[in-house]
Image: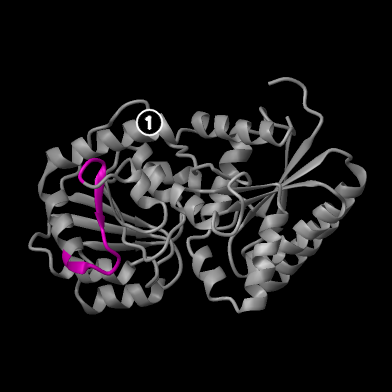
Amino acid sequence: MGKREYKIYMVGPSFKTRGGISSVLYIYHSNYRKYFNLGFISSYSGDLRIKDFVYFLLAVVRVLLLCIAVRYACFHIHMSTGGSYLRKSIIARICIMFGKKVVFHLHSGDFDIFIEEAGPAKRKRIIKMLNRAEKIVVLSDSWYKYFSRYVSKEKLCVINNPSPMCDNEYRKKTNIRVSLLFMGRMSQMKGTYDLLDALKCLKTRNYILKLYGDGDTDKVRRIVELDYMKEYVHINSWVPYPEAVKIYDCTDVFILPSYMEGLPMTVLEAMGRGIPVLATNVGGIPEIIIDGENGFIVNPGDKRALVEKLEALISDTGLRERMGRKGLEMAKENFSVEIIGKRLEILYKEMAVI
């Protein structure tokens, strides 16, 4: 790729933070650092508030010093909504003040709500800040369409999250009971309670649901105990990205009945391990899960449809295998680390930083 004059600094949460952005940054660090002249700046710890403040303060100081010391610097800023937006907008202002190139990489599944529900003055400030970036990366075509209302299309580009776990070939599952998996924050927004309600309506008990994550774990555990579901619903703590491969490889069906998403890493990871996905038609999910081909799509909150699709997937081994094979094929063709790396390269070439 030739000699590069620019140093590209990725700004975002610590790799140890739980969530999709940290997973993406970990993959970028592991796979792209040798191709692009990348540095990484952690602006958030995901731990105690005082630790978060220290991380942010150190990030601001480091960015300020780099803006002064490094003549050719580009800052690729990964942001969500709320506090993430506030922290990153402060960092972005420093970079822009020094005339540095800035990329915003927008991850949150509720950016539309964040903008639309802001007051007129705040909305104007958000849109103005977005327009000050040289480029804005969004995760799917649907988000491209949304942000094109506020930002010129020349600034926007779609770079999907990578599927880092793509297997070379499909692996048949040998579970005696069908293994269902939910991975992420246990909450109403992620559809955890809809999933538990759907399980109560299933005619079969030939399954085990494993939930991995954080959030409302105590509340979910109480529901499972009160409804006598402990035999077939197992609650586990959050698992870091590298260790998740073993969990996926023991899974028959992945489930994510969310009410909002960007482009969830867990869905891409499941596809990359040849697992059919049952998810909702929110965010970029309908662009990667083709209903009836590599999984099923239902409306958020539609518990009846959840029950119907779960019954079909649990009862039909052939259906699971066909969908799993198709998902793996799609992940390798469209979302592999190599494919996403090429899209990053196009972005950086357009910005003349490589």
What residue is pinned by disc 1? 167
The picture quadrant where one finds residue 190 is bottom left
Residue 26, given in percent of the width and then of the height, sits at 59, 44
| Above or below: residue 217 compared with residue 348 | below
The crowding category of the residue bearing disc 1, from other C-alpha atoms within 10 Å (few below 14, some 14 to 19, many at least 20), is: some
Q: Quadrant of the N terminus?
A: top right
Residue pictured at 86% horizontal, 47% vertical: 66
Residues in magenta?
292-304
Residue 194, given in percent of the width and then of the height, sits at 27, 70
Residue 33, given in percent of the width and then of the height, sits at 67, 33
The picture quadrant where one finds residue 189 is bottom left
Q: Is mark 1 on a helix, strand or loop?
A: loop
Pick the residue in front: 275 or 286.
286
Residue pictured at 71% horizontal, 54% vertical: 42
Residue 72, given in percent of the width and then of the height, sits at 84, 38
Drawn side of residue 238 relative to residue 123, left or right: left
Task: Name the kind of residue labelled 1 in the image.
Answer: Asp
Drawn side of residue 284 relative to residue 4, left or right: left
Residue pictured at 43% horizontal, 64% vertical: 185
Q: Residue 32: in sight, yes or no?
A: yes
| Above or below: residue 332 compared with residue 46 | above
Pick the residue in front: 325 or 107.
107
